Amino acid sequence: MADTGFDLVVIGGGPGGYVAAIRAAQLGLKTACVEREHLGGICLNWGCIPTKALLRTSEIYHLMQHAADYGFQVDNVRFDLAKVVARSRAVAKQLNGGVRHLLKKNKVTVYDGAGRLASKGKVAVSAEGAATATLTAKHIIIATGARARSLPGLEPDGKLVWTYKEAMVPAEMPKSILVVGSGAIGIEFASFYRDMGADVTVVEVLPRILPVEDEEISALARKALEKQGLRIHTGATVKALQKAKSNVTAVVEGADKKTQSLTVDRVILAVGITGNVEDLGLEGTAVKVEKGHIVTDPWFTAGEPGVYAIGDVAGPPWLAHKASHEGVLCVERIAGVKDLHSIAKSAIPGCTYCRPQVASVGLTEQAAKEQGRKVRIGRFPFIGNGKALALGESEGLVKTIFDAETGELLGAHMIGAEVTEMIQGYTVARTLETTEAELMHTVFPHPTLSEMMHEAVLAAYGRAIHI
């Protein structure tokens, strides 16, 4: 076994780990990255990227089915599921190769295998159960990500009861699906399968879908999805799953405590995630694990000298862009870069790529009021925007929340076409500590969807022109 010395070893090659490794190398640190499965992590290989490829397919299929609205005559529209899945996997494969190239280009040494803390400043690497290397480093970043959580009695089997992995590579299109959980992952799969023709039911234990979003946006999302044919049960739980040869019967208990049975071809579990904290050699260290995640301070130190944790393994929000940003900050702190700012979780945007899309940043209206803030609310509907009408995408809303006393942009919440691309405008505004005055004096191009961002600011101050 080789005993190789580095300044930094990163355990995990996902969007947090590989970005941290590259930034470290740029700063002159001799760096190694240990990855047990696929460079790029869950996001690139089984999450963010390939799911967007699937959702693009369902979007096109939906448009083709409504081609007459745009003056086209398209008959007998069909899809080849094998090719749909193959395209999604090809996108992931291409990006996986790109990550390996970037690491090589930046002179990061990659070790294929699982990494664990062997002793102070040492990482043991193993592959297929055999030790392959021992790495030494003054600094070690744990970026092992997370995996799908399961509930007692609702364990996935990969055949009838799916996690996100099986849901992304179906051999055949189910006629009916039950999605358990209505966070971003659950709603995206519900949207994809409904647009592809499946009969979809969503069960959510909380009172509303997309529970982290602003309540008004959540309600609009439910209305839009139900209009498309989804059946949604909130305040409900799946008490049991009874498997047959080719289908599953779910016993669902509603908010009124009454139960009903629902038989579907497949069940997709989307009930959250838990950090990959096992087999990391944390025993005997000062690293603390709470609720399945490593506890860190604002600068990602994990209690043990020289050990840090970033990304999903360090807790919510479980977002790739949050992990990448944490990786950069952590490494820059290690390298002694001056004037750094710790990450403000309220400034991290969230996106859900269902149809219609949902995006947000900052405080919800309820959260702002619970903080005792006096707020000014601005709204602008998609139906009042010329570009939205020209696109045939008139369903949606842009909502802004300002502090009534200071003019601070507290939050922004959107639902509608391409809002996942638009939200970054408000994210930049929050980072720059922009008030309503700067946003009002910003010139937005016409005709664009982004004009609604301007109009929603004007509306908060009684200056809206196009409502």
Image (tube, helix red, strand yellow):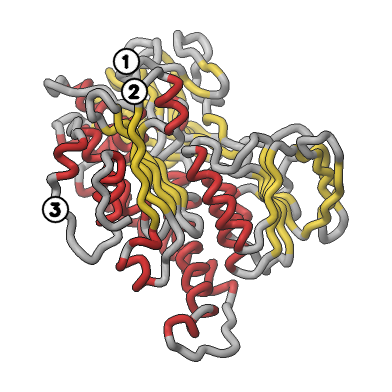
Which sits earlier in the primary sequence, circle 2 or circle 1?
Answer: 2
- Above or below for 173 versus 416: below
Cβ atoms at labels 2 and 1 below 8 Å apart: yes
**Where residue 362 sits: x, y (%)?**
36, 33
Callout 2: SS: strand
Q: Look at mark 3 in the image and give the residue it sits on.
A: 443
**Where residue 41 sits: x, y (%)?**
43, 44
The residue closer to the viewer here, 108 or 228, is 228
Amino acid, disc 2: Ile
Quarter-of-image position of residue 279 = top right
Residue in view at x 22 percent, y 40 percent: 428
Cβ atoms at labels 3 and 1 below 8 Å apart: no
Q: Look at mark 2 in the image and give the residue it sits on.
A: 140
The residue closer to the viewer here, 331 or 175, is 175
Between disc 3 and disc 2, the foreground one is: 3
Which sits earlier in the primary sequence, circle 3 or circle 2?
Answer: 2
Residue 306, labelled with which disc? 1
- Above or below for 256 versus 77: above
Mark 1 neighbour density, 10 Å: few (under 14) some (14–19) many (20 or more): some
Real-space Cα separation, disc 2 to disc 1, in angstroms: 6 Å
- Above or below for 292 versus 187: above
Amino acid, disc 1: Gly
Mark 2 neighbour density, 10 Å: few (under 14) some (14–19) many (20 or more): many
Residue in view at x 59 percent, y 82 percent: 78
Residue in view at x 49 percent, y 85 percent: 68
